[in-house]
Image (cartoon, rainbow, N blue to C red):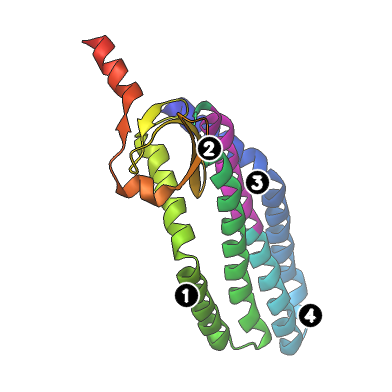
């Protein structure tokens, strides 16, 4: 466990080193500004400069958060995902990375805009309504993605296993995808099934059964 934490910490340090240096330089410049510049300028100029300083600080923090999440996902992909037979996590990580990046910068934008007199209440409401509409329109896709991730965790079947589908077909597992999984039937046809159907119904795994029989 200690080695695992050290590896993650090192990945985070490597990815966030540049933004952290920028943030430290920014803090040092701000201290100098407060001590040497503020006493020499007007209150109005202080207010204007303060707005830009807060903007720069929040942008630095947002960049650091983006780098940290990217480092954690990169570490997972290089050390965990490559060791699993399922391809779901390999496909899901880039999608998760892009989603986190969008979320980070949307939050940064919502924090910065009020500094410039923008009322974000209407913008937040619009984002909420838009997100709800997207979620409703894509609920089947989201459900299939979640089901695929649960299949990867629970591992009711693996690539290469012989299983019986809920439809009764005996197939070989070819791929566990983000939304759908692919199987090879006894007739040498490719069968594509939504992950939600696989997650909700009974699956018979003959390969697991052979392993249990050999152990007895």
Residue projecting furthest to the front:
187
The answer for how far apart the CA atoms under marks 3 and 1 are is 33 Å
Residue 33 at x, y = what percent? 74, 69
Q: Which mark is residue 132?
A: 1
Image quadrant where one finds the C terminus: top left
Pointer 3: residues within 10 angstroms few (<14), some, or many (20+)?
many
Closer to the eye: label 1 or 2: 2
Pointer 1: residues within 10 angstroms few (<14), some, or many (20+)?
few
The image shows residue 135, relative to residue 160, as above or below, that is below
Closer to the eye: label 3 or 2: 2
Which is nearer the N-term, disc 1 or disc 4?
Answer: 4
Mark 2 highlights which residue?
190
The answer for how far apart the CA atoms under marks 1 and 4 are is 50 Å
Label 3 secondary element: helix
Image quadrant where one finds the N terminus: top left
Residue 28 at x, y = what percent? 71, 58
The image shows residue 186, relative to residue 153, as above or below, that is above
Q: Nearer the viewer, residue 86 or 56?
A: 86
Mark 4 highlights which residue?
40
Q: Residue at x 69, y 51 (%)?
A: 19
The answer for how far apart the CA atoms under marks 3 and 2 are is 44 Å
Q: Is residue 75 magenta?
A: yes
The reply, left or right, for residue 178 in relation to residue 165 is right
């Amino acid at each position: 466990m200690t080695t695992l934490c050290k590896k993650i910490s090192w990945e985070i340090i490597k990815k966030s080193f540049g933004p952290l240096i920028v943030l430290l330089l920014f803090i040092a410049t701000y201290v100098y500004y407060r001590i040497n510049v503020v006493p020499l300028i007007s209150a109005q100029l202080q207010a204007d400069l303060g707005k830009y300083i807060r903007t720069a600080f929040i942008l630095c923090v947002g960049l650091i958060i983006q780098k940290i999440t990217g480092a954690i996902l990169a570490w997972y992909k290089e050390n965990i995902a490559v060791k699993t037979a399922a391809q779901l996590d390999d496909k899901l990580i880039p999608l998760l990375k892009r989603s986190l990046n969008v979320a980070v910068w949307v939050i940064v934008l919502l924090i910065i805009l009020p500094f410039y007199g923008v009322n974000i209440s209407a913008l937040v409401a619009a984002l909420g309504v838009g997100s709800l509409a997207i979620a409703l329109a894509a609920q089947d896709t989201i459900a299939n993605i979640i089901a695929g991730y649960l299949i990867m965790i629970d591992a009711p079947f693996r690539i290469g296993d012989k299983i019986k589908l809920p439809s009764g077909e005996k197939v070989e597992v070819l791929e566990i995808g983000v939304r759908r999984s692919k199987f090879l039937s006894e007739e040498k046809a490719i069968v594509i099934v939504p992950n939600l159907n696989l997650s909700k119904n009974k699956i018979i795994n003959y390969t697991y059964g052979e392993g249990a029989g050999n152990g007895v």
